[in-house]
């Protein structure tokens, strides 16, 4: 008899992620923390009620594609142009410092005598992949906190927003490069050629889509269902082409598709449509699936030490990296500290990157729990630290748009 347990699994995941999400929100923490806790509690590490089946894995993959597509649609090209040079320098240094910081931490801890790993990649690739995870920035928590403080439309606030967008793009490039090396036999020239080829291909396809889509959208303004389906098909096709033909991560294709939709000026309208499907079904399963990957929540002393050091590096590397970039661009010490602090949160972006690495064998399962905890800690402490660093500045002039 065919099993229908997957229906029960979905019901448990949706119910628990929503309940725990609301609970963590009551304690001024993001709902994603509750979704992660739901996966941990229901999974093999605690109650063992749900295992990661192929159905959950594939559904989670669609979920992560939707999340990256939505992130692309939220990308504000005008914001990048407004603070272009300064934001690029801030983001670039803010990517390089965490990248080498994560690599350094893994170089110390990633040894068979300390933390055995089941990753199929080389030790060096695994080490650098953790650095790539630390490059991620999720500013959703930062934006909400700054909005509450009335500091969103300040020099620091605008710099954080623009730098975060460029940080995402640089992080996608890093992820694309490292994922391309996940194969058994890798030729660096072939890998680089495929990456360049993909971006050229994506640029041409997005340009054609941009020209056709604007005309079609204007002609059928009221038929949003057609536009939503067309946009999603475009996202899926570009994701497939990225992975299948170029060996580039599918989420890279999804993100670029989202940016292309954003450039048409229709991203905000379509994002609301996709947000319903993502919130209702796909996102909870994706975040819960990360918790389901954790098979042992009880951390050994060495894993606890690794988590503490990694968390410290994750926090300081963004403050130092982005703060240094801001200082070089003419921001004062207080503004530089504010910008660096605003970039600390890793949130769902780091979890997306991590899940891709686990799927490709770039990251051993032993590192999942400590990295998830690091992501949770950085996400929780960011609003707390933001309230501290913005507390002393009362006359922050607003920047006109």
Image (cartoon, rainbow, N blue to C red):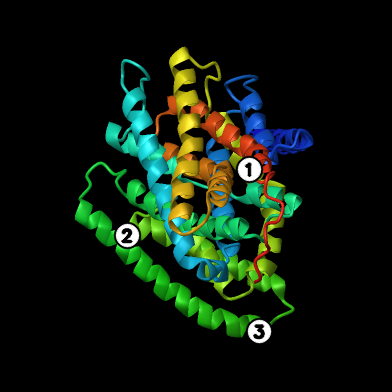
Looking at the image, residue 241 lies above or below residue 63:
below
Whichever of callouts 3 and 1 sits on the residue coming sooner in the sequence is 3
- Could you tell me which quadrant the N terminus lies in? top right
Tell me if label 1 and label 2 are in contact, CB under 8 Å.
no
Which residue sits at x=71%, y=80%?
Answer: 221
From the viewer's perspective, tell me whether residue 254 is left or right of residue 29: left
x, y percent for residue 280 = 72, 49
Residue 328 shows in the view: yes
x, y percent for residue 386 = 64, 43
The label nearer to you, 1 versus 2, is 1
From the viewer's perspective, tell me whether residue 143 is left or right of residue 86: right
Q: Residue furthest top?
A: 301
> Could you say whether the residue bearing mark 3 is in a helix, strand or loop?
helix
Whichever of callouts 1 and 2 sits on the residue coming sooner in the sequence is 2
- Mark 2: give few (<14), some (14-19) or many (20+) Cα within 10 Å: many
> Could you say whether the residue bearing mark 2 is in a helix, strand or loop?
helix
Which residue sits at x=47%, y=13%?
Answer: 301
> Could you say whether the residue bearing mark 1 is in a helix, strand or loop?
helix
From the viewer's perspective, tell me whether residue 123 is left or right of residue 136: left
- Which residue bears the numbered disc 3? 218
Q: Nearer the viewer, residue 373 or 122?
A: 373
Tell me if label 2 and label 3 are in contact, CB under 8 Å.
no
- Which residue bears the numbered disc 2? 195
From the viewer's perspective, tell me whether residue 310 is left or right of residue 345: left
Residue 119 shows in the view: no
- Which residue bears the numbered disc 1? 389
């Amino acid at each position: 008899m065919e099993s229908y347990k997957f229906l029960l699994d979905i019901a448990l995941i949706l119910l628990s992620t929503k309940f725990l999400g609301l609970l963590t929100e009551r304690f001024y923490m993001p709902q994603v923390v509750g979704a992660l806790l739901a996966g941990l509690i229901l999974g093999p590490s605690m109650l063992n009620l749900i295992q990661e089946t192929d159905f959950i894995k594939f559904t989670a993959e669609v979920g992560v594609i939707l999340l990256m597509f939505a992130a692309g649609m939220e990308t504000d090209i005008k914001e990048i142009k407004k603070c272009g040079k300064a934001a690029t320098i801030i983001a670039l240094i803010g990517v390089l410092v965490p990248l080498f910081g994560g690599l350094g931490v893994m170089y110390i801890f990633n040894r068979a005598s300390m933390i055995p790993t089941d990753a199929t990649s080389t030790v060096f690739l695994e080490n650098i992949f953790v650095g790539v995870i630390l490059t991620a920035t999720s500013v959703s928590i930062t934006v909400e906190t700054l909005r509450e403080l009335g500091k969103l439309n300040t020099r620091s606030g605008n710099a954080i927003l623009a730098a975060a967008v460029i940080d995402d793009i640089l992080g996608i490039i890093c992820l694309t490069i490292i994922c391309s090396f996940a194969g058994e036999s890798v030729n660096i020239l072939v890998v680089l050629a495929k990456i360049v080829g993909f971006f050229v291909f994506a640029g041409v396809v997005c340009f054609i889509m941009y020209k056709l889509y604007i005309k079609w959208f204007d002609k059928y303004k009221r038929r949003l269902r057609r536009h939503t389906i067309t946009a999603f098909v475009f996202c899926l096709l570009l994701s497939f082409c990225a992975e299948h033909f170029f060996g580039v991560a599918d989420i890279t294709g999804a993100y670029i598709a989202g940016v292309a939709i954003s450039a048409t000026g229709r991203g905000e309208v379509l994002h609301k449509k996709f947000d319903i499907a993502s919130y209702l079904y796909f996102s909870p399963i994706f975040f819960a699936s990360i918790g389901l990957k954790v098979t042992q929540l009880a951390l050994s002393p060495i894993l606890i030490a690794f988590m503490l050091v990694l968390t410290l590096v994750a926090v300081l590397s963004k403050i130092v990296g982005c703060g240094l970039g801001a200082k070089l661009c003419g921001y004062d010490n207080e503004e530089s500290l504010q910008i660096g602090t605003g970039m600390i949160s890793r949130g769902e972006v780091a979890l997306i990157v991590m899940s891709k690495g686990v799927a490709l064998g770039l990251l051993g399962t032993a590192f999942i729990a400590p990295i998830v905890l690091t992501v949770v800690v950085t996400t929780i402490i960011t609003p707390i630290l933001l309230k501290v660093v913005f507390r002393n500045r009362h006359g922050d002039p607003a920047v006109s748009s």
